[in-house]
Amino acid sequence: MGYVAIKGGEDAIENASRLTEYERVNSRTKPLEIDQIRTQLGSLVDKIMGEGSLYAPEHAALALKQAQGCPLEGAFILRAYRATLNRSYSSDIVDTRSMRVVRRISSAFREAPGGQILGPTRDYTVRMLNTDLASETKEDFERFISEFDFLDTDVLEEPKPFSKIMDILMEQGMLHGVDEDEDRRVVDITREAVKFPAPRSASLQMLARAETGGLCALAYSSMRGFGSTHPTIGELRVGKVKVVVSDRRGRKRCIGNIKVTESEVISKLKQKSRDPVPYMTLGYGLCFGHNETKAICMGILDRAMRVKDEHPANSQEFVLYHTEGVESYGFTNHLKLPHYVTFQSGLDNLRKAMKRKQDAMKSGEKPLAVPANAEDAVDPAPELL
Amino acid sequence: MIETEKFSRSYNYGFIDESTKKEIRRKILKAVAVPGYQVPYSSPEMPISRGWGTGGLHASLSLIGPDDVFKIIDQGSDASVNACNLRNFVRRMTDCRTTFDTAEATIIQTRHRITEEVLTDKQIIVFQVPQPEVLRSVERYEFKTRQMHAEADYAKMWVSLYESYVKFGAIMQGAGYPVKVNKRYIMTPSPIPRWDVPNLSHSDTLHVFAAGREKRIHCVPPHTLVEPLEFEDIKFMVESFDGIQCSVTGGTDAFMDEIYESDGDRKHTINDSNFMDKVRVGIRPRQRLFKNPA
């Protein structure tokens, strides 16, 4: 019963998936190695690890290979893999003050304690297509690396932790810590569904997993005019931090280093009702890997969501639900699934409405409205949306 | 580096880890205890896209055991490509027997339909729900809708139905017609067509509605009153297929698909694929049919 139809569906999806694979290998170019993706497409790997919420460069590179380079798909594969892993420990709080900094800038001051460290950045390059890369060889790699031979990486001294720009401003009383009424409960958004208003821990976790492009769009809207004023980057740090876990007997173990980007964004002045002197407020962002755009946007949105205003970026629910890449990507694509049952139900309403109109016109009554299309007919109250 | 051979089975039985399955089962029990109330749950990522039945899989896979017989339909059809994909996945992860026969299945996962054939107290039907919040069309914000549910404040919903009537001469809600469960919570029934809505009420079967992306589960337990929202003088109506005959089986009185041929001809076929197969061979399974008020 119904066997032929089933066979049709199964064959179709099997062939569709094989055809996708065919497109990947059809050119017979050299198969991509995971290590190549991990190292030479590092920015993309970092982005995927953040959105996939799993710090695992090899797995992220593999996901990207499997997704044929689609970042949304790659992050999704990594997330799904992550969901199958057991949580054995929770780490101690990561101390970004002791970060092994590779890049650190502040746009608030010309000089800062510890210095401005430009580090690796494409910020001050001209973005002309580099045609030399088209014919690059392994020898070119070696020649370039040999220019750094004078560095003896074994004897590089451990960098001294330096204070944060925020500390200076806090000491002078210009920047205040978190409000006393802030919800500081620590929740785990992967174990319980978020409820609004969400505590800041949930909010920052969701931002850290959010899709970079989505965060950028909303943060930009807030900067450009639909929200607060132009923020200042108090401090942006990129580097490696130690992850430490404590076992049941309280012994601490460092389980490795992860690369993170941290931003502290100074925003609008705030004033308390009883104190006439205003003070600065801070937005915070921290994400996996080297992803400055994301960290900065997180900082801007973290601040914007705590401001009571009417713009999209000021609504926690709006920002957090709609920047969630895996969910928005999935839901957008679900539109391709058949909807003929629900559509039929709308058609039925629409036909009846058209008939009522015809009947009314025949009998000379004033006809009622007919929805413009079947989708409107599905909606109980289109004018309320 | 990436380990590929550490465990004999690369995934847990039913894909989801046991503690999460337990959590989901407890949330389902809570939803059974408070019919129509949306219970938030963890909703871990699944290896299929959000919006493609992740919630349904959470519910099915946390309920399923080796002796279960699993059936999955999409828009009424066992043959739909997404149903095939999910069926293969569930079979791979559980080694369960799968079936197209509605009567034989113990767990039926569905997208947008209830089977025409009446379900029994030995069966559970799991709905894939895209939007669990019935009030979303009248209130955007989640924190407000939760409050409205808590206070049973459904005035906005009633007004929207009334406005639809004033404007168009009928309540224009198509699929997912709002219902009141156990005289308390207003709920959206997946988006099943109105045709299926009356079957929710005082049914022998447990109905589990799971929305993965929105992380909510709600239930209609067996023998629970489910009333579509209607006014004293403006009644709830199902889709009418009066005088329409299935072009394959000649059957009537079932939810029909409208099919257009290349030459522009229109014909109808019974939507529920297993029901159609049975009608074709002369079996007419027991149905609950709702008659529109005159």
Image (cartoon, coloured by chain):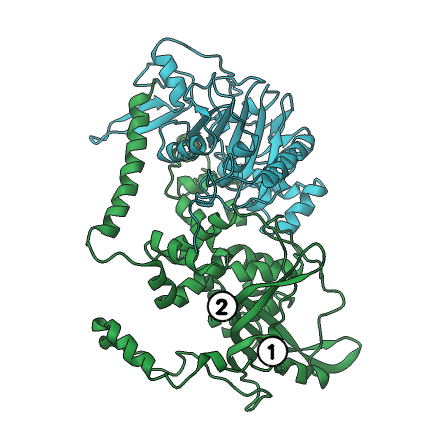
Q: In this view of the protein, can residue B31 be seen by the observer?
A: yes
Q: In the rendered image, which residue does mark 2 sit on?
A: A294
Residue B144's spot in the image, x, y percent?
Answer: 65, 50
Q: Residue furthest bottom?
A: A111
Please tell me which residue is depicted at 24% across the width and 75% down the height of the picture.
Answer: A139
- Distance CA(mark 2)–CA(mark 1): 16 Å
**Left or right of residue B278, residue B183 in this image:** right
Q: Is residue B31 left or right of residue A58?
A: right
Chain identifier of the residue bearing label 2 in the image: A
Q: Secondary structure at mark 2?
A: helix
| Amino acid carrying mark 1 in the image | Ile
Viewer-nearest residue: B280 or A312: B280
Quadrant of the image occupied by residue B284: top left
Give neighbour class at mark 2: few <14, some 14-19, many 20+ (Cα, 10 Å). many
Classify B88 as above or below A272: above
B3 sits left or right of B281 in the view: right
Q: Amino acid at mark 2?
A: Lys
Q: Which marked residue is nearer to the observer: mark 2 or mark 1? A: 2
Residue B243 is situated, as x and y percent measured from the top left of the image, at 37, 17
Instruction: Identify the residue at horizontal 43%, vertical 39% (top origin).
Output: A370
Badge 1: few (under 14), some or many (20 or more) residues near its Cα, within 10 Å? many
* Left or right of residue A26, residue A158 in this image: right
Quarter location, residue A265: bottom right
**Vertical position of residue A265 compared to residue B80: above or below:** below
For the colour cyan, the matching chain is: B
Quarter-of-image position of residue B266: top left
Tell me the subunit letter for badge 1: A
Q: Colour of chain A?
A: green
Local secondary structure at mark 1: strand
- Comparing B144 with B291, the one in front is B144
Which residue carries the number 1 mark?
A: A266
